[in-house]
Amino acid sequence: MKKALIVGATGFGGLGLIEILLRHPGIEIKQLVARKDVGVPVSAVFPHLRGFCDMVVDAPERIDFANVDIAFFSTPDRAGMTMINDFRDKGIPVIDFSGDFRFRSTDEYGVYARNKGMADGHLAADVIGEAVYGLPEIYADEIRSAKIVGNPGCFAICMILGLLPAVAGGIVDASTIVCDGKTGVSGAGKNPGEANFYPQRYENVNTYREGRHQHLVEVENILNREGSSPVKVFFVPQIVPLNRGIMITAYAPAKAGINTAKAASLYRDYYMGKPFVVITDTSPATTDVRGSNRCEIRPMVDERTGTLFVTAVIDNLVKGQSGNAVQNANLILGLDETLGLNVPAFYP
Amino acid sequence: MKKALIVGATGFGGLGLIEILLRHPGIEIKQLVARKDVGVPVSAVFPHLRGFCDMVVDAPERIDFANVDIAFFSTPDRAGMTMINDFRDKGIPVIDFSGDFRFRSTDEYGVYARNKGMADGHLAADVIGEAVYGLPEIYADEIRSAKIVGNPGCFAICMILGLLPAVAGGIVDASTIVCDGKTGVSGAGKNPGEANFYPQRYENVNTYREGRHQHLVEVENILNREGSSPVKVFFVPQIVPLNRGIMITAYAPAKAGINTAKAASLYRDYYMGKPFVVITDTSPATTDVRGSNRCEIRPMVDERTGTLFVTAVIDNLVKGQSGNAVQNANLILGLDETLGLNVPAFYP
Amino acid sequence: MKKALIVGATGFGGLGLIEILLRHPGIEIKQLVARKDVGVPVSAVFPHLRGFCDMVVDAPERIDFANVDIAFFSTPDRAGMTMINDFRDKGIPVIDFSGDFRFRSTDEYGVYARNKGMADGHLAADVIGEAVYGLPEIYADEIRSAKIVGNPGCFAICMILGLLPAVAGGIVDASTIVCDGKTGVSGAGKNPGEANFYPQRYENVNTYREGRHQHLVEVENILNREGSSPVKVFFVPQIVPLNRGIMITAYAPAKAGINTAKAASLYRDYYMGKPFVVITDTSPATTDVRGSNRCEIRPMVDERTGTLFVTAVIDNLVKGQSGNAVQNANLILGLDETLGLNVPAFYP
Amino acid sequence: MKKALIVGATGFGGLGLIEILLRHPGIEIKQLVARKDVGVPVSAVFPHLRGFCDMVVDAPERIDFANVDIAFFSTPDRAGMTMINDFRDKGIPVIDFSGDFRFRSTDEYGVYARNKGMADGHLAADVIGEAVYGLPEIYADEIRSAKIVGNPGCFAICMILGLLPAVAGGIVDASTIVCDGKTGVSGAGKNPGEANFYPQRYENVNTYREGRHQHLVEVENILNREGSSPVKVFFVPQIVPLNRGIMITAYAPAKAGINTAKAASLYRDYYMGKPFVVITDTSPATTDVRGSNRCEIRPMVDERTGTLFVTAVIDNLVKGQSGNAVQNANLILGLDETLGLNVPAFYP
């Protein structure tokens, strides 16, 4: 069994990792670390874990580096960059959940950081070039040999998987793609605030950060890197009364001659052999993927208006976060990519 | 007090009318008619009405034509067209909630009917030309003198109000407008079925009738009638775990030189003096209009991608249905347009 | 028009008052006061009020005492007791929403305060004896001439109204009454925290403060004051995934010979002429009263087990808070008790 | 691998079995049978199963008796009694999800059937005496050698587990126990109707079948069989806006000298070695058990009123249905009782 360290164990990202690793046949949790709740069993923080995982939470100062085959940093922005060198020096691979290692240059990072309203100087600029963007459907080979993986943003995963075949295949005018994104409330994390205040969130839909959500930087980076022509995306995130789930509906002018059958065929070819991407010809629903590591994608062409329309759904806490991270870990550790992750959605 | 007849009184449309007319200072309910629940008080169907409206439901055969200043047909498609002549002969104005009188020609009706999978022959073809499209923000003058008003579809109201200033003002390329629509579950009416099955609808978002929702016909009709160039709309409706509420997010290429300030100014001018349309410069939320007759619209231009982005929100059961119908009735009866409707949203 | 001051205008209690007073024909809002959001229009805090109430929020220091016929203190515990003398000296009647004036003695207050984990010394001990418990169904006469009214706790209103006829009528063994209470999330107020954290509250039911909820003190006080024998209540509050609504299910051994018909008759007699209490013989639902000032009560006797079973439902933000307060204000100001409050529930 | 047949595979009960057996190391699904959806893959009925279980649904006439080690009848009342002899003749053990085999006599069955408004004649009266009540925490030994197991009602499981230690231990006056039960909407099954109509169920709590819910018969049977004195239960079920989950709050007069510590100790002893019952000293929440096979129970004594108060929570679709059934199957097949079931709750 490979040994895992989880830093940031008491947030939703850490919880997701614990739940998956409890059933994982090749990776076991060796240590849980967090700043809050130090000294208490993680099952006191999450009562549903009682009897399943009663490991006590350690302070970051007590990390036992000798017992780590893979480290997950389920930590906020700018935390990973201060810890990374301790792990890099010891050759321990790290998967970071924040934006710290999703960019190839400090310039790209700066755009992301400013969009989020944070300090924009990167504190581990020397290692940023070694980091791999952790989307296994595209970068599996690089991830296998990586020591630092930046686990993508949840919206970014859904948008990139939904758009990349069309952009790389050149079947759309990529100069302005519209992405309309719906997310559940759990995406805002485990700290109570305006974004997850029940009386405001039940029975409500609203847009936010229209055209300037921080995940947009990642999406345009990757689509431009892999695509055949310059890509611009206008992305409007929305919060809907879901707890879990992301649905992206994306729109772009289709090139002449492209119809639904051709688009679907292109998508199927593109994701051939990718175990967690399912191309469908019916309307996807977030319930189809809730609790699972799947991304379900439906491309269709509306011939009347000449629009390629793509729907993509994921569970923001699984394929959008901890599930994708374990998928990365499986690759890094030389395990089967699907270990611990082959679970259908939780329904109803 | 003007006297109102409600046909189809025991559905959500009828209920909405009852609730509004109970507080209306100029219209009173004289008779409630329905096919189901005949002979029982409407408060036995809707217990929250006990003591507020205990009127007994009559069969359609017992309509008292002598006591009707305004008739509301809150009935399914193809019901109004069989009743209309009885009212027309007596000079009683009718507001119909279905698609029966939303179209100027039997051809247009046929497209609508086939999209909905119904028989497409219109049974009152001789009077279809007299009907007025019941969107008071645009057709107030025609409505004032109309005898037959087709109350628009809920999605159509939200889309038309959101798009018309841009289309009429010529600030977008209208040849392909994308409309991404989110609706609550109550839009499917009061009969239990797949669309409102709790275990499927809670924690779920899904698209349906992509590019072929029946309200699209109305939208393109009106936008083409009022707009300055040919309009095509690609509309993707979605069900989200709301009970009430519609949010439309619409996207179109902005003409050169158009920015958010200019668009907002155009929208404000267009709706000057329209009491139920509010132009805002912050992100609208469906909670801002739940239970009210308002449509809140926010136009913005994303200059990076050259996109005009419009958000519009309504309560599908009020401005999207019974509230809009009462607004029409006020106009027809020569009353102030806002009577009975000046109520803020129900929050939280 | 009588002139109202609302202190604590930007919480849910203040909002409830604004919504009701906007439609009230006999009371108008003259000033809104709060500690937070001073200097901004209340419609910036609650966007759905735009155009309906754009009054600017004043600091407590700027209260205009010359323009107040009735003052509402929608403020936290221990705020009202520091302000009361300024109003009392000027003869301005006050309705306080906290526990500050719900008790006749500092001893009773001390029990309440300690249950809530607060300091237990009352800071206006000299005036506590003048305060009236603001439950108009029981104390209307005292309220009419009161200068200080303690608006009851939401759970307390529902429990007292549900139990008092049985206790006063002597049809149960009151020595141990069980009250099982379900409340919506909005009862925890407008500050984000554990109690209203969406990911924890959706799909969840849990008990809390079992047998020691602070409202219990009020309930036993009043039941013992009005009842015919000593009363003890074991009360278990629960949070359910409602936003609004309280349902109390209460159980007590029925005296011999009492059946459902007799119990219902007793309840109907007891509440004869009380406009907001409805006795029903079907199962009440919180949707029957959401948004209304009604309390719906159903007494039944299970003869097999000899149990009197009472269900009572209210909207915690209306009859449980601001609606009840306006009812008190109507009495104090010599207005019809129902003014501004005769509105059916908001459904669906 | 043992071979399982699921009859009634396309309801929520069947789905629950499929989900558990997909991860079960000792039982595999051999055949799915239903009346509806015959000839289509079960993943067309439940899209989230695509790729996990695409087995085609067979008609009941096509049951392959040669390949069944254990049969699950996830069928409505009165279906199992018509099929049982075909299985009994072949020695195939059956676990039935309806009320058909929960009773020892046709008289007891008659009470149940009449409470549910069904025909009350039992169609397999000759075998009813062989059936075992399928609650493994009490009847594990009988279940191990049973050929017919009646899987209990979801409410019954929660009530019996919550009350039995107190009743058997003689620490309460069992002559009138009050059970206040809250259930999620999925308990009403997969057919759309009033009980699961979204606009009625969101934001609503209501009681139903007060004192006469059909599961009450089971509860009193078992408590009287195992208890030390005659037991009567007054049970009031309620629907709350949960999809999954049952919470029972039960109340009974505690015998003198019983306090929380003694009650908790008694409960812990009673369930010693029972892997799915957890006794807790904090307030249970339905989220603690959602998706898991656990029953979490908290006994406490309110000494002020002399009341034993027990809270018990389960997931109605797991421990309340398919999870409990698999637990029974494990026992019958000689497998470890926890196989396939050791999964923590799904959170958040």
Image (spheres, coloured by chain):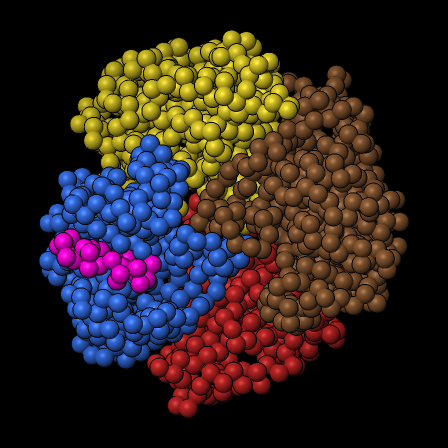
Chain colours: A brown, B yellow, C blue, D red
What residue do we see at 42% from left, 23% from top?
B152
Image position of B119 (left or right of C297): right
Taking A209 as reference, is C344 above or below it?
A: below
Taking B315 as reference, is A1 above or below it?
A: below
What residue do we see at 53% from left, 63% from top?
D286
Q: The magenta stretch spans which residues?
A: C76-98
Magenta highlight on residue C97: yes
Q: Quadrant of residue A260?
A: top right
Which residue of the protein is positioned furthest toward the bottom in this rendering?
D257
Image position of B162 (left or right of D54): left
Rendered-image quadrant of the C terminus of chain D: bottom right
Taking C223 as reference, is B226 above or below it?
A: above
What residue do we see at 26% from left, 61% from top?
C82
Image position of D71 (left or right of B7): right
What residue do we see at 48% from left, 72% from top?
D311
Rendered-image quadrant of the N terminus of chain D: bottom right
Could you tell me if residue C224 is visible in this image?
A: yes
Q: Quadrant of residue B94?
A: top left
Taking A271 as reference, is B132 above or below it?
A: above
